[in-house]
Image: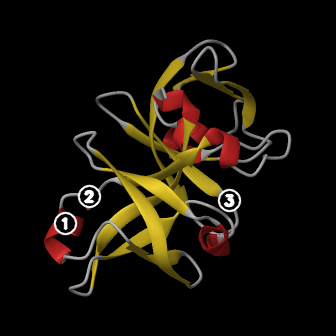
Amino acid sequence: MSVDDWVVIGEITKPFGLNGGLKIRALTEDPGRFRRLAGAVLEAADGTRQNCTFADVRTDRNSVILFCREIDKVEQVERFVGGTVRIPRSEAIPLPQGSYFQHDLLGLRVVLEDGRYLGEIREIWPTGSNDVLVVRDGERERLIPAIKSVVAEVDLTGKRMVLRWMEGLLDL
């Protein structure tokens, strides 16, 4: 499968306990969704992948504790810290029109409607009311609210996002 065939549903933040547990920052609005899956693929920052058949899943508001049948030592978990939890796109819950998976937005070029280049989306911060896009152009970092009044267009095929001008937008 190519990278586009996968959906990132979590980020591996640290080991949990000594028996191979993984603490995950859920990138889904419903962390309970992990309990309805049989497994996933863990991907380390270096691209190494490991199948993970779920043995146990515990959730709270934004984090998940996973135990995989294939992993039973903290040392096995450590190589995946900073990596991701992925599922095949075919198993992802369909999103409503105008909604996107966070990992699909990372790396998009961001421009204003008049064509001015602002940078690329490097991070997405959940804030509760709306996500904030961290856009960097090499020299500068801008924090852009991911709201309909600002985001005019998302073109995943063309790998770009078009923003509407908003007073103070470039001052953020």
Give the spatial CA distance, label 1 vs label 3.
35 Å
Q: Residue drawn 57% across and 20% down?
A: 159
Residue 130 disc label = 3
Identify the image quadrant of residue 6. Answer: top right
What amino acid is found at the position of numbered circle 3 in the picture? Asn
Give the spatial CA distance, label 2 vs label 1.
8 Å
Q: Position of residue 158 (x, y in %)?
A: 61, 14
Label 1: element kind: helix
Residue identifier under label 2: 80
Q: Residue drawn 70% across and 66% down?
A: 129
Residue identifier under label 1: 76
User: For this rendering, which residue is in front, 45 or 151?
Assistant: 45
Looking at the image, is 36 positioned above or below residue 79?
Answer: below
Q: Of circles 2 and 3, which is in front?
A: 2
What amino acid is found at the position of numbered circle 1 in the picture? Gln
Disc 2 crowd rating (10 Å Cα; few below 14, some 14-19, many 20+) is many
User: For this rendering, which residue is in front, 110 or 47?
Assistant: 47
86 sits to left or right of 21 = right
Disc 1 crowd rating (10 Å Cα; few below 14, some 14-19, many 20+) is some
129 sits to left or right of 3 = right
Residue 86 shows in this picture? yes
